[in-house]
Each structure stands twice: as C-alpha cells, then as structure tokens.
Amino acid sequence: MELGSEFLDRIGLINEIRERFVLDLHGIHGIRHWARVRRHGLRLAEQTGANALIVELFAFLHDSCRLNEYSDAGHGDRAADYAMSLNTRYFELGRTDLEKLCYAIRHHSDGMISEDRTIQCCWDADRLDLGRVGYVPDPFYLSEVAHGYISEAYAWSRQTPLSVIRGGGT
Ligand SMILES: [Fe+2]
C-alpha cells in the first residue's frame, strides 16, 4: 500500500532545490528544462498510465545535483541520494515507488531503455527536451507514445535561443 502517495509540497520542493542548485538556474539544466520535462512527462503519463507523482518528482530532481553543464558522471547518483533524503519532507513515496524514482534519476543519462512505463516516461520526458542543446530526440530511445511528440518538443525546446538560455551577458 502506498500511503500518502499523493502528497507533494511542490513549492517547498522547488525552493529547496533552487537553494541547493549550484549552476545557472536559467541554464540548459535549469528551471526551464525542469518545467519542460514536467510538462512532457505529465502529458505522456496521462496516456501511458505512468505514475504522475514519480514523473513530476523526476522532472524537478534529476539534474538538481549537477556540478557542471557537461556529462558530470556522478550527477545521477548524487540526485538519487538527494531525492531519497527528501522523501517524507516534501513528498511521500512508499518504498517501491521511491526505489523507482531513484533508479530513474540514477540512470537517466546512461542511454538506457526501460520496460517499466514510469521509468521510461521519466526518460522520455528528459530526452524530448534535447532540442535545447541542438539534438533532435532519437526515437530509438523513446517509447512509442513519445514518438508522436518529437517534432513539437523539438520546436518548444528551441523557442528560447541558446544565447539567452546560457545567460549570454546578462
Ligand atoms: Fe535533464
């Protein structure tokens, strides 16, 4: 039984992550990216039956512990540990769901595919925003449902020019 699985202090969680975040909040792994991943993920979850709370938590947390804007090999592990430390403070997931969230976070940049609809939904949502760094999402790494959003997601990711996203002088 997943007691309290609907609990999410969204504002508290975002404020917590913002205070901890050491990169540019308006950079390529910053708050606009979290918002697009959340939007993609929740829309996909409606169609696939993925766990929407896990998907939303993934959007906010998966890049929260990055130390640089590049590959940063340890950022998934750090963010998974961070997510675990926040459970029952800003959200409440049962053991199975928490493990699922942490697995999705830990491996989100490992180029994997999952048969679990919630984990794949998290990765789909993140990959659909690759347009912000100039890549069209590769269907090979996406669920079939996500295939239908590649063009739209790419256009959305490209709406804000990279020079602005990266802070270019301001
Ligand atoms: Fe990401």
Image: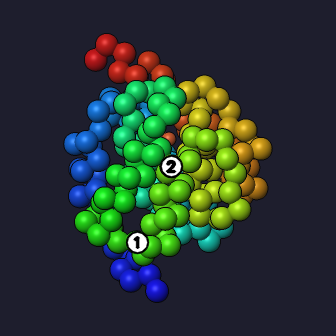
For badge 1, the amino acid type reads Leu
Q: Is residue 129 visible?
A: yes
Q: Residue at x 53, y 69 (%)?
A: 51
Please state the horizontal and vertical placement of residue 103, each as a whole percent of the image: 53, 56
Please state the horizontal and vertical placement of residue 158, each as a whole percent of the image: 55, 30
Q: Residue at x 39, y 45 (%)?
A: 78
- Farthest-out residue, top: 169
Question: Would you name the residue on which mark 2 appears?
Answer: 106
Counting other residues with Cα less than 10 Å from the Cα at mark 2, is it few (<14), some (14-19), or many (20 or more)?
Answer: some
- Is label 2 in a helix, a strand or a loop? helix
From this view, report whether residue 96 is shown above or below residue 1.
above
Q: Residue 128: which quarter of the image?
A: top right
Q: Which residue is drawn at 52% across and 64% down?
A: 100
- Is label 1 in a helix, a strand or a loop? loop
- Farthest-out residue, bottom: 1
Q: Does the residue labelled 2 lie within 8 Å of ligand 1?
A: no
Question: Would you name the residue on which mark 1 appears?
Answer: 93
Please state the horizontal and vertical placement of residue 123, each as a whole percent of the image: 59, 50
From this view, report whether residue 52 is shown above or below residue 94.
above
From this view, report whether residue 83 is shown above or below residue 17.
below
Q: Which label is found at residue 105?
A: none
